[in-house]
Amino acid sequence: MQNKTYNLYPEVNNFEKFTLKAGNLHEIYYEVCGNPNGSPVVFLHGGPGSGCSPTQRRFFDPAHYRIILIDQRGCGRSSPQGEIKQNTTDDLVSDIDAIRAVLNIDKWLVFGGSWGSTLALAYALQHTNRVTGLILRGIFLSRPSELDWFLGQVQAFFPEPWESLCAYLPANKRHNPIEAYEQLVFSDDTKISIPAAIRWNTFESSIMSLLPRPASQNSEINGEVELARARVQIHYIQNNCFVGQRDLLAEAKAKLGHVPTDIVQGRYDMVCPPITAWELSQAMPHASFHMVEDAGHSAMETGTTSALVAATEKFKSFNI
Protein backbone atom coordinates (compact mmCIF):
# COMPACT_ATOMS: atom_id res chain seq x y z
CA MET A 1 0.00 0.00 0.00
CA GLN A 2 2.89 2.34 0.71
CA ASN A 3 4.95 1.40 -2.36
CA LYS A 4 2.57 2.95 -4.85
CA THR A 5 1.56 6.59 -5.16
CA TYR A 6 -2.17 7.09 -5.50
CA ASN A 7 -3.73 10.20 -6.99
CA LEU A 8 -7.17 11.71 -6.60
CA TYR A 9 -9.82 10.43 -8.97
CA PRO A 10 -10.99 12.80 -11.74
CA GLU A 11 -13.61 15.39 -10.91
CA VAL A 12 -17.08 14.03 -10.27
CA ASN A 13 -19.77 16.36 -11.58
CA ASN A 14 -22.85 14.14 -11.75
CA PHE A 15 -24.08 14.61 -8.19
CA GLU A 16 -27.50 15.08 -6.63
CA LYS A 17 -28.24 17.72 -4.00
CA PHE A 18 -30.56 17.19 -1.03
CA THR A 19 -31.53 18.86 2.23
CA LEU A 20 -32.66 17.33 5.50
CA LYS A 21 -34.86 19.26 7.90
CA ALA A 22 -33.35 18.86 11.36
CA GLY A 23 -35.52 20.14 14.17
CA ASN A 24 -37.22 23.50 13.83
CA LEU A 25 -34.15 25.46 12.83
CA HIS A 26 -31.60 23.67 10.67
CA GLU A 27 -31.62 22.38 7.12
CA ILE A 28 -28.68 20.08 6.40
CA TYR A 29 -27.23 20.02 2.89
CA TYR A 30 -25.91 16.74 1.57
CA GLU A 31 -25.00 15.42 -1.84
CA VAL A 32 -24.69 12.00 -3.41
CA CYS A 33 -22.51 11.01 -6.35
CA GLY A 34 -20.71 8.01 -7.82
CA ASN A 35 -22.31 4.61 -8.32
CA PRO A 36 -25.98 4.64 -7.15
CA ASN A 37 -25.67 0.91 -6.42
CA GLY A 38 -22.14 1.08 -5.07
CA SER A 39 -20.63 0.65 -1.62
CA PRO A 40 -21.76 3.64 0.49
CA VAL A 41 -19.22 5.97 2.06
CA VAL A 42 -19.90 9.16 4.00
CA PHE A 43 -17.39 12.03 4.11
CA LEU A 44 -17.24 14.13 7.30
CA HIS A 45 -15.49 17.46 6.89
CA GLY A 46 -13.25 19.25 9.34
CA GLY A 47 -13.28 22.62 11.03
CA PRO A 48 -15.55 22.54 12.87
CA GLY A 49 -17.20 24.88 10.40
CA SER A 50 -15.48 24.17 7.11
CA GLY A 51 -18.11 22.60 4.87
CA CYS A 52 -17.42 20.24 1.97
CA SER A 53 -15.75 20.91 -1.37
CA PRO A 54 -15.85 19.18 -4.79
CA THR A 55 -12.27 17.94 -4.33
CA GLN A 56 -13.35 15.74 -1.44
CA ARG A 57 -15.46 13.59 -3.76
CA ARG A 58 -12.24 12.59 -5.48
CA PHE A 59 -10.82 10.40 -2.70
CA PHE A 60 -13.21 7.67 -3.85
CA ASP A 61 -13.56 5.57 -6.98
CA PRO A 62 -16.91 6.79 -8.37
CA ALA A 63 -17.41 3.51 -10.22
CA HIS A 64 -17.29 1.59 -6.93
CA TYR A 65 -18.58 3.92 -4.24
CA ARG A 66 -21.85 5.66 -3.56
CA ILE A 67 -20.33 8.85 -2.13
CA ILE A 68 -22.22 11.01 0.38
CA LEU A 69 -20.89 14.41 1.47
CA ILE A 70 -22.58 16.34 4.30
CA ASP A 71 -22.29 20.01 5.23
CA GLN A 72 -22.67 20.00 9.02
CA ARG A 73 -25.05 22.32 10.87
CA GLY A 74 -24.27 25.97 10.17
CA CYS A 75 -21.61 25.04 7.61
CA GLY A 76 -21.23 25.39 3.86
CA ARG A 77 -24.56 25.11 2.10
CA SER A 78 -26.52 24.14 5.19
CA SER A 79 -28.73 26.80 6.70
CA PRO A 80 -28.95 29.00 8.66
CA GLN A 81 -25.31 29.64 7.83
CA GLY A 82 -23.17 30.09 10.92
CA GLU A 83 -26.01 29.15 13.31
CA ILE A 84 -24.77 27.82 16.65
CA LYS A 85 -28.12 27.17 18.35
CA GLN A 86 -29.06 23.48 18.43
CA ASN A 87 -25.54 22.77 17.19
CA THR A 88 -23.62 20.17 19.19
CA THR A 89 -21.71 17.01 18.39
CA ASP A 90 -24.73 14.90 19.40
CA ASP A 91 -26.84 16.91 16.96
CA LEU A 92 -24.36 16.24 14.16
CA VAL A 93 -24.26 12.52 14.95
CA SER A 94 -28.07 12.44 14.79
CA ASP A 95 -28.02 14.24 11.43
CA ILE A 96 -25.53 11.76 9.96
CA ASP A 97 -27.63 8.79 10.94
CA ALA A 98 -30.84 10.46 9.78
CA ILE A 99 -29.29 10.94 6.34
CA ARG A 100 -28.22 7.30 6.32
CA ALA A 101 -31.79 6.26 7.04
CA VAL A 102 -33.28 8.59 4.41
CA LEU A 103 -30.91 7.11 1.81
CA ASN A 104 -31.94 3.60 2.87
CA ILE A 105 -28.35 2.65 3.66
CA ASP A 106 -27.89 -0.17 6.16
CA LYS A 107 -24.18 0.31 6.82
CA TRP A 108 -21.49 2.56 5.40
CA LEU A 109 -17.79 3.36 5.43
CA VAL A 110 -17.08 6.54 7.44
CA PHE A 111 -14.27 8.88 6.33
CA GLY A 112 -13.31 11.86 8.50
CA GLY A 113 -10.32 14.17 8.80
CA SER A 114 -9.26 16.57 11.56
CA TRP A 115 -12.49 17.55 13.38
CA GLY A 116 -14.12 15.05 11.04
CA SER A 117 -12.10 12.30 12.75
CA THR A 118 -13.63 13.28 16.10
CA LEU A 119 -17.08 13.24 14.57
CA ALA A 120 -16.44 9.92 12.82
CA LEU A 121 -15.42 8.32 16.11
CA ALA A 122 -18.40 9.84 17.94
CA TYR A 123 -20.71 8.49 15.24
CA ALA A 124 -19.08 5.04 15.22
CA LEU A 125 -19.31 4.80 19.01
CA GLN A 126 -23.02 5.62 18.99
CA HIS A 127 -23.97 3.69 15.85
CA THR A 128 -21.36 0.94 15.74
CA ASN A 129 -23.66 -1.47 13.95
CA ARG A 130 -24.00 1.01 11.06
CA VAL A 131 -20.26 1.30 10.36
CA THR A 132 -18.37 -1.02 8.02
CA GLY A 133 -15.05 0.73 8.53
CA LEU A 134 -13.28 3.98 9.43
CA ILE A 135 -10.75 6.06 7.52
CA LEU A 136 -9.40 8.74 9.84
CA ARG A 137 -6.90 11.52 9.07
CA GLY A 138 -5.15 14.15 11.18
CA ILE A 139 -6.56 12.81 14.41
CA PHE A 140 -8.21 15.23 16.79
CA LEU A 141 -9.98 14.15 19.99
CA SER A 142 -10.96 17.59 21.31
CA ARG A 143 -8.99 17.14 24.53
CA PRO A 144 -7.90 20.24 26.47
CA SER A 145 -4.24 19.48 25.70
CA GLU A 146 -4.97 19.55 21.97
CA LEU A 147 -6.92 22.79 22.20
CA ASP A 148 -4.16 24.34 24.32
CA TRP A 149 -1.69 23.44 21.58
CA PHE A 150 -3.76 25.03 18.83
CA LEU A 151 -4.59 28.10 20.92
CA GLY A 152 -1.06 28.97 22.01
CA GLN A 153 1.71 26.40 22.14
CA VAL A 154 1.89 26.13 18.35
CA GLN A 155 3.47 29.60 18.35
CA ALA A 156 6.75 27.85 19.20
CA PHE A 157 6.82 26.65 15.58
CA PHE A 158 4.76 29.36 13.87
CA PRO A 159 5.56 32.63 15.66
CA GLU A 160 4.70 34.77 12.64
CA PRO A 161 1.11 33.53 12.14
CA TRP A 162 0.57 33.66 15.90
CA GLU A 163 1.84 37.22 16.03
CA SER A 164 -0.46 38.16 13.15
CA LEU A 165 -3.41 36.58 14.95
CA CYS A 166 -2.71 38.44 18.19
CA ALA A 167 -1.61 41.74 16.65
CA TYR A 168 -5.16 42.24 15.39
CA LEU A 169 -6.33 42.51 19.00
CA PRO A 170 -5.91 45.31 21.54
CA ALA A 171 -2.89 44.73 23.73
CA ASN A 172 -5.02 44.01 26.80
CA LYS A 173 -6.89 41.21 24.97
CA ARG A 174 -3.93 39.28 23.59
CA HIS A 175 -3.51 37.05 26.62
CA ASN A 176 -6.71 35.20 25.68
CA PRO A 177 -7.20 35.40 21.91
CA ILE A 178 -10.09 32.91 21.76
CA GLU A 179 -12.19 35.06 24.09
CA ALA A 180 -11.27 38.22 22.22
CA TYR A 181 -12.08 36.75 18.81
CA GLU A 182 -15.34 35.33 20.12
CA GLN A 183 -16.46 38.85 21.04
CA LEU A 184 -15.46 40.20 17.63
CA VAL A 185 -16.78 37.36 15.47
CA PHE A 186 -20.16 37.34 17.19
CA SER A 187 -20.60 41.09 16.86
CA ASP A 188 -23.83 42.15 15.15
CA ASP A 189 -21.79 44.65 13.11
CA THR A 190 -20.42 42.82 10.06
CA LYS A 191 -17.77 45.53 9.68
CA ILE A 192 -16.35 44.12 12.89
CA SER A 193 -17.26 40.43 12.65
CA ILE A 194 -16.24 39.60 9.08
CA PRO A 195 -12.68 41.05 9.15
CA ALA A 196 -12.11 39.33 12.51
CA ALA A 197 -13.39 36.04 11.10
CA ILE A 198 -11.07 36.31 8.11
CA ARG A 199 -8.09 36.96 10.40
CA TRP A 200 -9.08 34.01 12.63
CA ASN A 201 -9.43 31.60 9.71
CA THR A 202 -6.18 32.78 8.13
CA PHE A 203 -4.28 31.65 11.20
CA GLU A 204 -5.30 28.02 10.81
CA SER A 205 -4.81 27.99 7.05
CA SER A 206 -1.27 29.32 7.49
CA ILE A 207 -0.17 26.33 9.58
CA MET A 208 -1.89 23.58 7.57
CA SER A 209 0.94 22.16 5.50
CA LEU A 210 4.57 21.21 5.93
CA LEU A 211 5.68 23.69 3.29
CA PRO A 212 3.96 27.02 2.58
CA ARG A 213 1.21 26.70 0.02
CA PRO A 214 1.19 29.16 -2.88
CA ALA A 215 -1.58 31.71 -2.62
CA SER A 216 -4.39 31.20 -5.10
CA GLN A 217 -4.57 34.00 -7.62
CA ASN A 218 -8.24 33.47 -8.46
CA SER A 219 -9.82 32.88 -5.07
CA GLU A 220 -12.21 35.51 -3.81
CA ILE A 221 -12.93 35.81 -0.12
CA ASN A 222 -16.60 35.33 0.74
CA GLY A 223 -17.09 37.23 3.95
CA GLU A 224 -20.32 35.47 4.91
CA VAL A 225 -18.73 32.04 4.46
CA GLU A 226 -15.67 33.09 6.47
CA LEU A 227 -17.91 34.42 9.23
CA ALA A 228 -20.00 31.25 9.40
CA ARG A 229 -16.90 29.08 9.61
CA ALA A 230 -15.33 31.14 12.39
CA ARG A 231 -18.53 31.30 14.42
CA VAL A 232 -19.12 27.56 14.29
CA GLN A 233 -15.48 26.77 15.06
CA ILE A 234 -15.24 29.13 18.01
CA HIS A 235 -18.57 27.85 19.35
CA TYR A 236 -17.25 24.29 19.30
CA ILE A 237 -13.83 25.15 20.72
CA GLN A 238 -15.39 27.08 23.60
CA ASN A 239 -17.38 23.94 24.44
CA ASN A 240 -14.47 21.48 24.06
CA CYS A 241 -16.30 20.31 20.93
CA PHE A 242 -18.92 18.77 23.23
CA VAL A 243 -16.75 15.67 23.76
CA GLY A 244 -13.95 17.08 25.90
CA GLN A 245 -15.31 15.36 29.00
CA ARG A 246 -15.21 11.95 27.30
CA ASP A 247 -12.26 9.58 27.00
CA LEU A 248 -12.64 8.73 23.32
CA LEU A 249 -9.49 6.59 23.40
CA ALA A 250 -10.92 4.33 26.10
CA GLU A 251 -14.29 4.22 24.35
CA ALA A 252 -12.70 3.30 21.02
CA LYS A 253 -10.64 0.58 22.69
CA ALA A 254 -13.73 -0.88 24.33
CA LYS A 255 -16.19 -0.69 21.42
CA LEU A 256 -14.41 -0.40 18.07
CA GLY A 257 -11.87 -3.22 18.15
CA HIS A 258 -13.77 -5.12 15.47
CA VAL A 259 -14.23 -2.15 13.10
CA PRO A 260 -11.68 -2.12 10.22
CA THR A 261 -9.80 1.17 10.54
CA ASP A 262 -7.11 3.10 8.69
CA ILE A 263 -5.39 6.02 10.45
CA VAL A 264 -3.42 8.51 8.33
CA GLN A 265 -1.31 11.19 10.02
CA GLY A 266 1.21 13.78 8.87
CA ARG A 267 4.45 13.61 10.86
CA TYR A 268 4.68 17.42 11.00
CA ASP A 269 1.02 18.18 11.61
CA MET A 270 0.92 21.45 13.57
CA VAL A 271 -2.87 21.63 13.84
CA CYS A 272 -3.38 18.12 15.25
CA PRO A 273 0.00 16.88 16.56
CA PRO A 274 0.86 13.23 15.80
CA ILE A 275 0.82 12.08 19.43
CA THR A 276 -2.97 11.86 19.28
CA ALA A 277 -2.97 9.63 16.20
CA TRP A 278 -0.32 7.43 17.78
CA GLU A 279 -2.36 7.11 20.98
CA LEU A 280 -5.43 6.17 18.94
CA SER A 281 -3.40 3.53 17.10
CA GLN A 282 -2.38 2.09 20.49
CA ALA A 283 -6.00 2.03 21.63
CA MET A 284 -7.01 0.37 18.35
CA PRO A 285 -4.06 -1.97 17.67
CA HIS A 286 -5.95 -3.69 14.85
CA ALA A 287 -5.96 -0.42 12.86
CA SER A 288 -3.56 0.24 9.98
CA PHE A 289 -1.48 3.26 11.01
CA HIS A 290 0.22 5.35 8.33
CA MET A 291 2.59 8.11 9.45
CA VAL A 292 3.30 10.28 6.41
CA GLU A 293 6.85 11.47 6.94
CA ASP A 294 6.78 14.54 4.68
CA ALA A 295 3.39 16.05 5.48
CA GLY A 296 1.64 18.45 7.83
CA HIS A 297 -2.10 18.64 8.44
CA SER A 298 -3.54 19.13 4.99
CA ALA A 299 -5.20 16.22 3.21
CA MET A 300 -3.95 17.71 -0.05
CA GLU A 301 -0.26 17.07 0.57
CA THR A 302 0.99 14.39 -1.81
CA GLY A 303 1.83 11.67 0.71
CA THR A 304 -1.36 12.14 2.70
CA THR A 305 -3.56 12.18 -0.39
CA SER A 306 -1.89 9.00 -1.60
CA ALA A 307 -2.38 7.23 1.75
CA LEU A 308 -6.06 8.24 1.90
CA VAL A 309 -6.83 7.09 -1.64
CA ALA A 310 -4.90 3.87 -0.92
CA ALA A 311 -7.17 3.32 2.08
CA THR A 312 -10.33 3.80 0.00
CA GLU A 313 -8.89 1.39 -2.56
CA LYS A 314 -8.23 -1.18 0.15
CA PHE A 315 -11.79 -0.94 1.44
CA LYS A 316 -13.09 -1.73 -2.07
CA SER A 317 -12.15 -5.35 -1.41
CA PHE A 318 -14.28 -5.48 1.73
CA ASN A 319 -17.73 -7.04 1.49
CA ILE A 320 -19.78 -3.94 2.29
Image (cartoon, grey):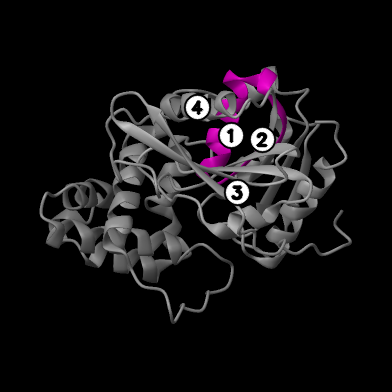
Q: Any magenta on residue 126?
A: yes
Residue at label 2? 280
Kindly state the secondary structure of the residue where label 2 is placed.
Answer: helix
Kindly state the secondary structure of the residue where label 3 is placed.
Answer: loop
**Badge 4 density bin: few <14, some 14–19, many ≥20, Cα 10 Å:** some
Identify which residue is drawn at 84% across, 45% down.
Answer: 314
Identify which residue is drawn at 53% across, 74% down.
Answer: 213
| Mark 4 → mark 1, Cα distance in angstroms | 9 Å
Q: Nearer the viewer, mark 1 or mark 2?
A: 1
| Mark 4 → mark 2, Cα distance in angstroms | 20 Å
Residue type at mark 1: give it: Ala
Kindly state the secondary structure of the residue where label 4 is placed.
Answer: helix
Q: Any magenta on residue 251?
A: no
Which is nearer the N-term, disc 3 or disc 1?
Answer: 1
**Badge 1 density bin: few <14, some 14–19, many ≥20, Cα 10 Å:** many
**Badge 3 density bin: few <14, some 14–19, many ≥20, Cα 10 Å:** many
Which is nearer the N-term, disc 4 or disc 3?
Answer: 4
Which is nearer the N-term, disc 4 or disc 2?
Answer: 4
Identify which residue is drawn at 72% across, 61% down.
Answer: 9
Residue at label 1? 120
Residue closest to the eye, 138 or 320: 320
| Mark 2 → mark 3, Cα distance in angstroms | 11 Å
Residue 311, x across and y down, in percent = 77, 47
Which is nearer the N-term, disc 4 or disc 1?
Answer: 4
Residue closest to the eye, 303 or 106: 106
Numbered mark located on residue 93 in the image: 4
Q: Which residues are magenta?
A: 110-134
Residue at label 3? 138
